[in-house]
Image: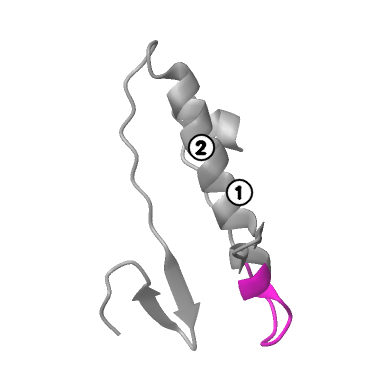
Amino acid sequence: MIDGIVSGYNGSVFAYGATGAGKTYTMLGREDDLGVMGRSVKELFRQIELNSSQREYKLKISYIEVYNEIIRDLLSGSP
């Protein structure tokens, strides 16, 4: 997916499942064992650094939660 994003395509990751199924751990991981988000962002910036002499990048990231039909922007800082 990261190759596509670096090439200009949008990318999305959805974690869906029952409460307690491990979605948060899978997405975030731990400080010493990154999850999907940490690994993806790390690789994304590595690829951007490798290719920045050939093209210019504009990166936009959203981090949202849908719970009980309520959408929350988890990057906004407001509850």
Kindly report the secondary structure that dominates the magenta region of the rendered protein.
loop
Question: Label 1's element?
Answer: helix
Q: Which residue is mark 1?
A: 39
In depth, the one of 33 and 35 nearer the eye is: 33
Residue at disc 2, secondary structure? helix
Image quadrant occupied by the N terminus: top right
For the residue carrying disc 1, how many other residues have a C-alpha within 10 Å: few (<14), some (14-19), or many (20+)? Answer: some
**Residue in view at x 38 percent, y 57 percent:** 62
Name which residue lies at 57% across and 38% down: 43
Write the residue at 57% across / 46% down.
40
| Relative horizontal placement of residue 12, taking residue 21 as reference (left or right) | left
Amino acid type at circle 2 is Leu
Q: State whether residue 14 is above or below residue 50.
A: below
What distance separates the C-alpha of mark 2 from that of mark 1?
8 Å
Is 60 situated above or below 6?
below
Give the labeled residue for mark 2. 44
Report the residue at 33% width, 45% height from top. Answer: 60
Kind of residue at badge 1? Arg
Badge 2 or badge 1: first in the primary sequence: 1
The magenta segment: 15-25
Q: Position of residue 50 (x, y in %)?
A: 49, 20
Q: Is 22 part of what is drawn in magenta?
A: yes
